[in-house]
Amino acid sequence: MKNVTIALDDETHRLARIRAAELGTSLSAMVKAYLQGVAAGDIPAPAPQAGAREIPMAFASQPASEFTPLKKPRQPGALRGKVHMAEDFNETPQWLIDAMEGKDSGKPWPMG
């Protein structure tokens, strides 16, 4: 189930809560029932308000036949032998060990 956040002015919120209480339901249940009715076509959707953006046409993706990748994808092992790691990569620096043991000077990096 998804949560939806809506913005209401204080008076609309107050009146909607009162009406929901009169009907013996929650404001959330009222909004859910309304949206289900609009989605099913039982309740007509309201006309767009001033300032609402309209989508001029439906989105159409580019046909697969027109798609061309930007470059050849990297093959497995393409970087083998090209990546150089530090020689002491497998050794934990003493400053890091000190920091983990609480013996550091409070600085997050070693001072050289």
Image (cartoon, grey):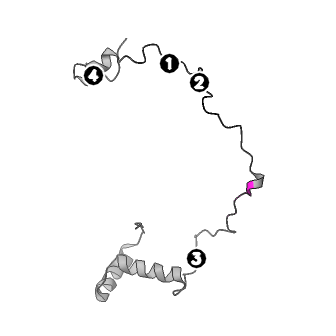
Q: Position of residue 80 (x, y in %)?
A: 59, 24
At a point 61% along the width and 68% down the height, the residue shown is 53
Of label 3 and label 2, which has the lower sequence position? 3
Disc 2: which residue: 80
Q: Secondary structure at mark 1?
A: loop
Q: Whole-Å distance between the Cαs marked 3 and 1?
A: 59 Å
The residue that appears at 31% across and 83% down in the rendered structure is 25
- Residue that label 4 marks: 99
Indicate which disc, 4 or 2, sits on the residue closer to the N terminus. 2
Q: Secondary structure at mark 2?
A: loop
Kindly identify the amino acid type of the residue bearing the numbered disc 2.
Arg
Q: Which region of the structure is painted magenta?
A: 58-64
Front position among marks 3 and 4: 4
Query: What's the residue type where badge 3 is placed?
Result: Pro
Secondary structure under badge 3?
loop
Q: Nearer the viewer, mark 4 or mark 2?
A: 2
Mark 1 sits on what residue? 85
